[in-house]
Amino acid sequence: YQYITKNFDGYGASDSKVNQAFLGVKFDPSGKLRGEFKAGYGQKKFDSSIPGRSTKTDTWVAYANLVQDFSKRTSLGLSASRSFQDDGNYANNAPYYQTLAALTFQHYFTHKIGGTAMVGYNRSEYQEETAEPITGIFKKRTDNAYSAGVGVFYNIQKYLKARLDYNYIKRDSNFEGYSFNENRAMFKVVYSP
């Protein structure tokens, strides 16, 4: 069971409380498949009402993180979730459901150097009608984002890793001006004691 309260400075109409109940399993047997999966039901209730918005919204919620180890050097990971979110780019922190899934393949070429490849999907379903900026038409926004990427990493020490990643993201939206393609190149140094 999870309880979340959100308070936004300067815009009290977005203040809300979320109640979520999950049932799931977590496993790490001596075999090659490990991870956790949980699913359930969630309800979000806003502290105050505004015209055109329901005070209460509910949906199924889930979280999964599974890893299949093919060998000591090669693995395939699946992560997925569905949750309540708030979009801070809107004046009223518009609420939406986020459903996402990603598949990541990882392989070590040596004991310190490895690479990754991933594909992902992210869907955002907005729960209230807002004005489309270009046309001014009120409707519920839905975004679908598809991504793919590759990366290489070097484990300098047990606690220090350097990595270089490239991601391509294609976003499709039913709102004019919100569909675009994005290319990301990132260099990171990760320290984890």
Image (tube, rainbow, N blue to C red):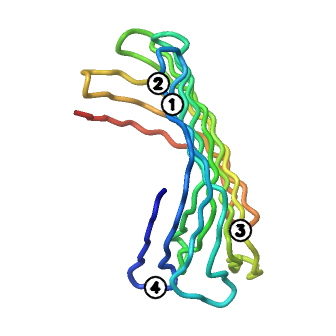
Q: Which residue is mark 1?
A: 35
**Given the image, on which type of amino acid does mark 2 rest?**
Asp
**Given the image, on which type of amino acid does mark 1 rest?**
Gly
- Upstream in sequence: badge 4 or badge 1: 4
75 to 109, vertically: above or below: below
**Given the image, on which type of amino acid does mark 3 rest?**
Arg
- Upstream in sequence: badge 1 or badge 2: 2
Q: Residue at x 26, y 22 (%)?
A: 158
- Upstream in sequence: badge 3 or badge 2: 2
Number of the front mark, 4 or 3: 4
Q: To which quarter of the image does residue 152 belong?
A: top left
Secondary element at tag 3: loop
Q: Quadrant of the C terminus?
A: top left
Q: Residue at x 60, y 42 (%)?
A: 80
Residue 141: mark in rendering: 3
Q: Which residue is mark 4?
A: 12
Residues at badges 1 and 2 in contact (C-beta under 8 Å)?
Answer: yes
